[in-house]
Image (cartoon, grey):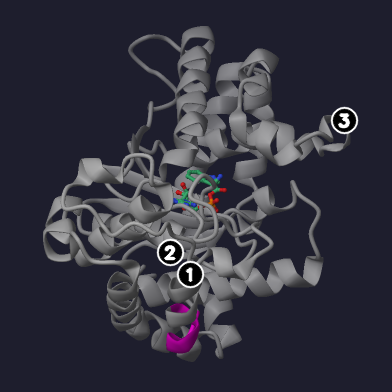
Amino acid sequence: MRIVSGIQPTGNLHLGNYLGAIRNWVRMQEDGECLFFLADLHAISMPHVPADLSANTREMVAALVACGVDPDRSILFNQAQVPAHAELQWLLNGTARMGWLNRMTQFKDKSGKNREGASIALFTYPVLQAADVLLYQATHVPVGEDQKQHLELARDIAQKFNNDFASEDAPVFTLPDPIIPRDAARIMSLRDGSAKMSKSDPSDMSRINLTDDAETIVQKVKKAKTDPEPLPSEAKGLEGRPEAANLVGIYAAMAGMDVDMVLADFGGEGFGKFKPALGEMLVEMLAPINARFVELRQDRAALDAILRKGAEKARALAAPTLEATYAALGLVRG
Ligand code: TYM
């Protein structure tokens, strides 16, 4: 089992990232060989401030380690220190089809009305993402629901490449399976139950950052958008109530309960009772992560050393697949 996943270092690690992906990363460290990386090459697909990208990259390492990603057990690195990611992307550009990329909903969302002004990197972003996982022969990729389409594309690229350039009994690439949590696969914004919780939302009130202090968490939960009805006593009563469903879903995911169990406790209660309980639970569960993050972020040399060591191991693991790809394409390498 080879487990590979990434996160963009474009801002704070938030509760959506944690419940949708990072918690699974931490758990899967028990199951197999893991590579987790900061998708800094992906981060340049949108306008960005270079100094912020460097700072966010280090902060994200601190946040991941604070969450339980163990750099002694897993390989933790950033793409920019493993050139094989960018190289393999180019090699896969020959296989990926315009029509496939045209269907990607993330490109449509992120480019918005300004399609002509979007960067080429934003358009070819999913091919780099395919390279990220195919490079290491990943078998399992723990992600939130929003990355499912990109993972399907990675499988399509792998399959076409194998068909076109490899023999059936010696495929170049393994087809990766996405691992998406049953609950909490899509945590929504605290301000709008129809938008996902996201690092790029301009309102910080829309998300709980894993680095928020206790007071901020309580305030954000208190101000979260809700409706005037009390909570129902069964999950189906949450239909058509996206904000209420989101808060109950967060409670359930954090507490390791199912939604019906939460509603057995809170059904009939208003948000005046539920929100403080949710705030308190979040504070209690995130406090240790926060404390560890505050400590780790201070030691820049140690964070850089983690990335350097991780990149060295990743480069070694990437080399055979990269060479096999060059060879399959008939490219001469000395
Ligand atoms: P990114 O940085 O947006 O998010 C990192 C992980 O968090 C999950 N996630 C969520 N899950 C539930 N609810 C939410 N509101 C929510 N928001 C984010 C994402 O699904 C993701 O698992 N393109 C990727 C990074 C990437 C990658 C890869 C992932 C680059 N290469 C290869 C896997 C494999 C991204 O931008 O994730």
Q: Nearer the viewer, residue 77 or 51?
A: 51
Query: Cβ of disc 2 within 8 Å of ligand 1?
Result: yes
Q: Which residue is mark 3?
A: 116
Q: Which residue is mark 2?
A: 15
Query: Cβ of disc 1 within 8 Å of ligand 1?
Result: no
CB contact under 8 Å: marks 1 and 2: yes
Where on the picture, by quarter, is residue 256? bottom left
Q: Which residue is mark 1?
A: 208
- What segment carries the magenta color? 212-217
Instruction: Note whether residue 331 is visible.
Output: no
Q: Nearer the viewer, residue 48 or 105?
A: 105
Residue found at x 41% / y 45%: 144
**Amino acid type indicated by mark 3:** Glu
- Tell me where residue 171 appears, x and y as whole percent: 40, 19
Judge the density around disc 2: few (<14), some (14-19), many (≥20) Cα neighbours within 10 Å.
many
Quadrant showing the N terminus: top left
